[in-house]
Image (cartoon, helix red, strand yellow):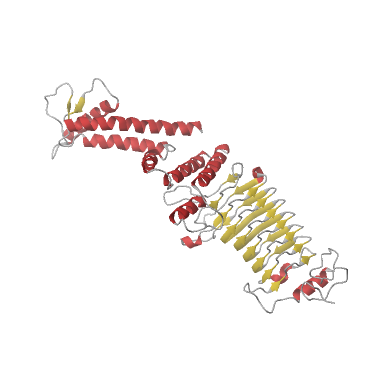
Amino acid sequence: MSSGLCGRPAAPGPDSVCICHDPSPAKDGNQFWAAVKASSVDNRSSFQEDYDCTNFVFPTFDGFSIFEDKRVIFTEASFLKGAHFKLCRFKAFRFESATFSGPLYFADAHADALTFSSVTFEDCVVFARSSVGDADFMWAKFKKRVVFRSVTFSRSAYFFETTLGDEAIFDDVVFGQRESRPCSDRGVVVANFRNAHFVQPKLVDFARINESERVHRGFRASFLNTDIEFVRFTDIAWHRNKAGELVLEDEYDLEQQNNNPEAKSLYGETTDELVTATYRRLCKNFDNSRQYDLAEDCYVGSMRVKAKSPRTPLSQKVIYTLYNWLSAYGSSYTRAATMLLSIVVVFILIFPLHPVGVQLASSPASAPLYWPMNKSPRDWSRTMAASISANLAIVSLSKNPVYLPASTLGKNLALVEAPLVALQTALLFLALGRRFKR
């Protein structure tokens, strides 16, 4: 008698199924693997699979080496004792909606593509010293400990709406390619953790991500709608744009959506509020772990999203742009101090120009001082000192200045300089206050 599922001879028992689909954990392992070896596919589908193990029930932990360099479909298969893939190279495995009742080990192995979408992992999962081209863990459920250690995802890595129920460790993981030369933007690999559910976020640990000197791209990640406030991030080489700013993939998604509103994302709508909230959660995370520079980077990211929003009025965008230009949204005291010094130096250089000039305050009838032409260094020094004195008097609102602007134009410039320097000084103290508060 044949099985109703696949036409193979039915195994003894009331279910009338073949040994490949027999759910009994006591079935003969040798007979099972012999049946699997004999089940290679002749009429291939669009997937071009070599084996179709749909709904198979695997009773043993080992034996998967027969699939080396093969394409295999494991859709809705059951692995009663888990599975061990070691020291092998595989082309493509598809485990959609499969169930691993025992542990899964993928060690010292390589796969061009792995699809674990909607898979349930009842026991621990370990990926170690391995590489995967395209990895798909969307909607997967990890109920126990999961470890990715020294793993490379060279083309794609999807953890969209993945559930991590227990401890999760991502250590020395590379999202990209470990190589000795930079590659084009096509080689960018996004770690997509959008809408992921971390049941115990304090047990989720990202360490040494894209840290290798041979990796020329930072950790480009999407964490939209994911609770990352208490996740541990240690020694992460975060993705940065050409300006050196930390940028999450969610911000790039938002820009793409704003540039092409009609385009629909496979992962849902991305809004200004959601991206800003993601940056803020990451900012709180870094504050709690005392990674203050990274916290400031995320604060700047949240402000940058607000400034770029199409819903932000033009007047506010101008203010945001100036705020960023003068002090990186109040987060960089070095930029604020540099801009303050630059403003003062510019006015010091402007005042001795003709027809502005500076003159002694005690002698209004004296000849104004201008930058001398073809004169001695002593004259240049005297003029410079007079301009510095006049500028210091202006910014300090001195009542007894030694030098003052000699013309109406110079007095009007002084009315501009005084509040501008006061504003930039306030931004400097604001930035210093933020840093010392952290």
Callout count: 0
Pinpoint residue 374: horizontal percent, then vertical percent.
Answer: 13, 40
Instruction: Write the residue at 72% across / 71% down.
Output: 66
Q: Is residue 182 visible?
A: no
Pinpoint residue 60: horizontal percent, then vertical percent.
Answer: 79, 64
Pinpoint residue 24: horizontal percent, then vertical percent.
Answer: 84, 64
**In the image, farthest residue toward the bottom:** 42
- Give 267 or 145, whichever is nearer the viewer: 267
**In the image, farthest residue toward the front:** 262
Pinpoint residue 361: horizontal percent, then vertical percent.
Answer: 18, 23
Instruction: Write the residue at 50% across / 61% down.
Output: 187
In this rendering, the answer to whether 223 lies above or below 89 is: above
> In this rendering, would 409 be left or right of 437?
left
Q: Is residue 437 visible?
A: yes
In this rendering, the answer to whether 175 lies above or below 113 is: above
- Say which quadrant the N terminus sits in: bottom right
Instruction: Write the residue at 59% across / 47% down.
Output: 226
In this rendering, the answer to whether 386 lies above or below 163 is: above
> In this rendering, would 141 be left or right of 192?
right
